Amino acid sequence: MSAILLIVCVASFLWWMELAAEWASALKGAAGLAELKVPDSSTAGLSVIIPARNEERTLEQALTSVLSALPFRGEAILVNDRSTDGTLEIAHKLASSDHRLKVVDITDLPGGWLGKNHAMWQGYLVSKGGYLLFTDADVIFEQDCLVKAISLCEEEGLDHLVSTPTIITRGFWERIFVPIFAILLMSRFRIWRAANPQSRFYAGIGAFNLVRRTVYELAGTHEALKGEAVDDLYLGRLMKSTGGLVKVVSGAGCLRVRWNIGLRGLMEGLEKNAFAAFGYSLIRVVGGCLILPAATLGPALVPFSCILFGGSRILWFAALAGLGVWCSFAVLYRLASYATGDSWLYFTTFPVGVLLMIWTILRSAVLYHMRGGIKWRGTVYERNANQK
């Protein structure tokens, strides 16, 4: 038993240490949007497509920031997806004073579609730009952000540009949950590898998926993602499947978003995606929820167990590996802090964050089966609409 524990602790330490080293290497020397120069001129057309359902709390500030950041040949398209609050009124008010803003109002959802995916597709249908930016209705853009992004795509011949936003966190529980989510996401997807055409990895972020129109159409548009819950990441997979050039850059200082409000909001925000990320498979969920604590909580507790109760030489070696896991998470939280601005000392809470993530995953799976499908923004999408 001691030998098995040693193997688990060492394997865990090596896994998290390797992730920290690769992530740090990806960040080193990589220029973000904020560091890029503003081009003298830009002739490329851009359509910013923003799906919105009941977004009155954040919409006006977000839309105003988009309009102020639009390049010379730019337009913004707000797609109202059956909102029941003041979303449509806010959009029309802004559109009446700025001709660059178009408003598309959706009142019915065709079968087989998720509402957000359908809204983005409808936005594409009325768009004119050679580049399309799919973003959310709560993302705030700085003035030169979009011009810099288009210029980067033109200079490097990119077909898909992903930019990671600054994530605004407030309160203790948001600062526990967001970093561990980011770390586990990076552990699974390694989005910095997406730029390598030979890599199987891909990238996509709901806050900033900028695509070249011709390649997006070649990939099948959002029609190919009708029922996908993890639409942002899978748009990246779709774009990469065409052989298009991909790049991931930091958007710190250029775009920011408060993902969700409070712990409850964060968990509810992952209701749609968490189970879907496991391919709607209970076997994968159970496996993941067993492996995750074995790779984190177990090694983290061994050093304390040895200090309190003693142990064999093998257990003390396992404890050293467990300390290595703590050190790896300290580095990982430092790396995650570039996106949140929070103190890296929150790494001391990573066991709590892991438990919260396990609960979130299990909750997503249970609710999916109780409801007979995904519930998102007031609509239940039946199982056959979102499973392949």
Image (cartoon, rainbow, N blue to C red):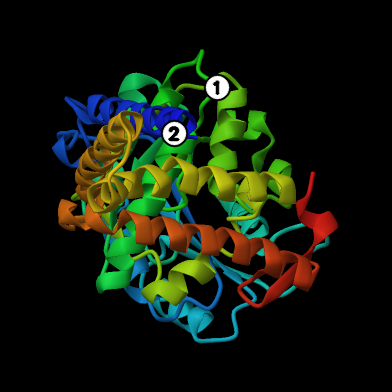
Q: Is residue 6 above or below residue 72?
A: above
Instruction: Using a 10 Å C-alpha cutoff, classify the residue at mark 2 as few (fewer than 14 neighbours), some (14 to 19) or many (20 or more).
Output: some
Q: Nearer the viewer, residue 154 or 6?
A: 6
Q: Tell me, yes or no, if residue 67 can be seen here.
A: no
138 in relation to 254, above or below: below
Please provide percent x and percent y for residue 78: 50, 65
Residue at the bottom extreme of this rendering: 85
Instruction: Report whether 266 appears left or right of 349.
Output: right
Question: How many labels were placed on the picture?
Answer: 2
Disc number lying in front (2 or 1): 2
Q: Which residue has dot 2 on it?
A: 2
Q: Quadrant of residue 348?
A: bottom left
Q: Which residue appears at 23% of the width and 35% of the height?
A: 41
Disc ID at residue 349: none
Say which of 69 and 244 sits in front.
244
What is the secondary structure assignment of the residue under circle 1?
Answer: loop
Query: Residue 65: x and y, percent?
Result: 29, 63
Give the amino acid at mark 2.
Answer: Ser
Question: Which residue is more in the foreground, 243 or 215?
Answer: 243
- In primary-sequence order, the first of circles 2 and 1 is 2
Task: Compute the Cα span from label 2 to label 1.
Answer: 36 Å
- Which residue has dot 1 on it? 200
